[in-house]
């Protein structure tokens, strides 16, 4: 009887280790989301590319900086 109990304990422990290894496996973790950032051509602040105003290869953080930067170069 004690042998059966020991086998059950070992099986339970093995199952526990198996589940733990699966939970910590790098492939099962959600990948760190990296987002493209751009630098505002006027103030130099970094912001997500999807929130920026783009014109060619330049980007701005807001409409005001876009206009200010354009008037500066005219
Ligand atoms: Zn800016």
Image: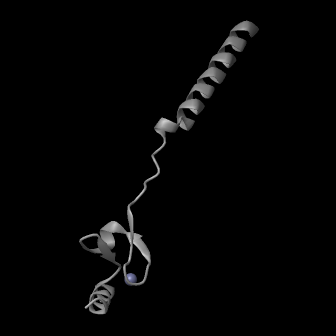
Q: Is residue 1 visible?
A: no
Residue depicted at 38% across the width and 84% down the height: 42
Q: For this rendering, which residue is in front, 45 or 10?
A: 45
Residue depicted at 24% across the width and 71% down the height: 56
Q: Position of residue 57 (x, y in %)?
A: 28, 69
* Left or right of 1, for residue 60: left
Q: Position of residue 20 (x, y in %)?
A: 59, 32
Answer with the quarter of the image where residue 19 lies: top right
Residue depicted at 62% across the width and 27% down the height: 17
Q: Is residue 6 above or below residue 40?
A: above
Q: Position of residue 72 (x, y in %)?
A: 31, 91
Residue depicted at 68% across the width and 17% down the height: 10
Answer with the quarter of the image where residue 63 lies: bottom left
Residue furthest to the right in view is: 2
Q: Quadrant of ligand 1?
A: bottom left
Indicate the quadrant containing the N terminus: top left, top right, bottom left or bottom right. top right
Indicate the quadrant containing the C terminus: top left, top right, bottom left or bottom right. bottom left
The total of numbered circles placed on residues is 0
Q: For this rendering, which residue is in front, 26 or 73?
A: 73
Q: Is residue 55 above or below residue 37?
A: below
Answer with the quarter of the image where residue 43 lies: bottom left
């Amino acid at each position: 009887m004690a042998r059966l109990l020991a086998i059950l304990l070992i099986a339970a422990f093995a199952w526990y280790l198996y589940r733990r290894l699966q939970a910590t496996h790098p492939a099962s973790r959600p990948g760190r989301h990296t987002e493209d950032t751009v630098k505002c051509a006027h103030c130099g602040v970094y912001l997500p590319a999807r929130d920026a105003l783009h014109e060619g290869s330049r980007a701005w953080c807001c409409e005001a900086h876009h206009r200010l930067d354009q008037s500066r170069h005219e």
